[in-house]
Image (spheres, grey):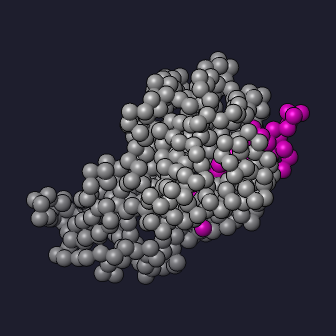
Amino acid sequence: MKVIWLPEPYEAAIAISDDPDICDFHAFKTMYDFLMKIDFPTTRAMWVYKNREPTGSPPLDCIFYSPLLTDSECLDYCRLLNSKGFEICLHGASCGNNTREMMENAFDFLKREIRASSVYICHSKNAENLYWDAHTANSNFERRILELYTKNTCYGEVPGSKYFWGDLCRKTIRYIRLYRTRMLNTLSFNPSMPYHDFSKPFVNFWFSATKGHIPRLFTKTNLDFLCKQNGAGILYQYLHKYVLKDGTILKEVREALEMAANDSRLLKQPVSVIMDRLKLFQNIVTINYNGKAYIINANKNPVGSLQIKLDTLDEFHADSFFKIDKVRKTAVFETINPLSFISIKTSDKFTNSKKYKIKDGLITINFSKATIFVNTLPKAISLNNSNKIPPESVYVEYKTPEAQRLEILQEIYPWELYKLKAGQASILLREHLFLGRKFSTEKYLETPGKIEDLSNW
């Protein structure tokens, strides 16, 4: 028996984060007209302004272009997309280095003209990127190694720099894309996603993405396996590059997207929707105690449509309303209230149960950044700090102000963080060895070889 993070009736999720680099409006509209037709909402990153500076520090001799939100035709179209469930986020204020003032103006523009987004996608080598290039390091040794690879420096988290906007990011943005993998199940690659790196306080949460050719990723075998894993594929794409010169979409890409769109097992939503759901479920905790199973909601918000995968349907009882899907062997709870729990009587046991201590009806569950107290009694219980836990409810004591602000129970494990870095390194090595990417970061954006040939991803 295990809790499934997805709402009923979904078994897996797909989200696409789409970059605008080197795109014209016709290709953009052709692809997104198609995505609206098949009801496949994505997260589309956009620029607001023309660049005042080149990208990179030192500056790189390369030119990017894309429809801008300050173009009336593009703005109207993005408003239409947003009304259809698509998410419009920023890829920076412009394609070049952006000062704090430009970033503030761009966020104000997006909020005023369309809708604020909690997602941000850093562009290339822009000087305002936060914790980028060598600054992704978590140790001095790692940083020195990365400095050998790239001479580019970013300043988004450096107070006093004209490119500093870290405090604005902390206040405005919830999720930023970072590491990449080639496996469809991004959640398997990064199970702590979205995660907070306490050494990088200006970014609230990071998420990873899957880099790959859509026809290679969206095969029946891959989608079946994604559903079996109850996974999430968060794609990193340049969707406009699948639009051919004659104005049609590459046939195999169109067919792959249609297959995924028509798969009723898959939840297709923008990145922020998937991340919000994953974040909620990081604070859903399960334990097996005294012949019962407990589902504990340590969030300050309710969690709706909670699915539990069962080993057996025999003698399943709960103290909250639920329904049974016999075909999928799943129990579905309509909602679990904030800071509360559901008690289940069943012969099954949770496979992902947490360790705990129990004394006088008070269950204590320790995490690296918080302690959860569960009062199982029909009367209030006082803790040592004089806080009273109401009858049959949950209290969370966070160990740092940052953990409390972000409601983080458990920080990302170092082994997982370095697995993400190793996955990113393997992608870069593959591009250097087989796809013509230049080892000099001063040159690879100018002559990228086959790197942007999406069929080679």
- In the image, taking residue 337 as reference, residue 229 lies left or right, namely right
**Residue 208 to residue 83: above or below:** below
Q: Residue furthest top?
A: 72
Q: State the residue at coordinates (19%, 76%).
A: 359
**Residue 142 to residue 262: above or below:** below
The part of the chain drawn in magenta is: 229-258
Query: Quick one: quadrant of the C terminus?
Result: bottom right
Q: State the residue at coordinates (62%, 60%).
A: 425
Q: State the residue at coordinates (23%, 76%).
A: 358
Q: Where's residue 11, x and y in %?
A: 60, 61
Q: How many numbered markers are drawn?
A: 0
Q: Is residue 249 magenta?
A: yes
Q: Is residue 447 magenta?
A: no
- In the image, taking residue 297 as reference, residue 397 lies left or right, namely left
Q: State the residue at coordinates (84%, 50%).
A: 252
Q: Quadrant of residue 232?
A: bottom right
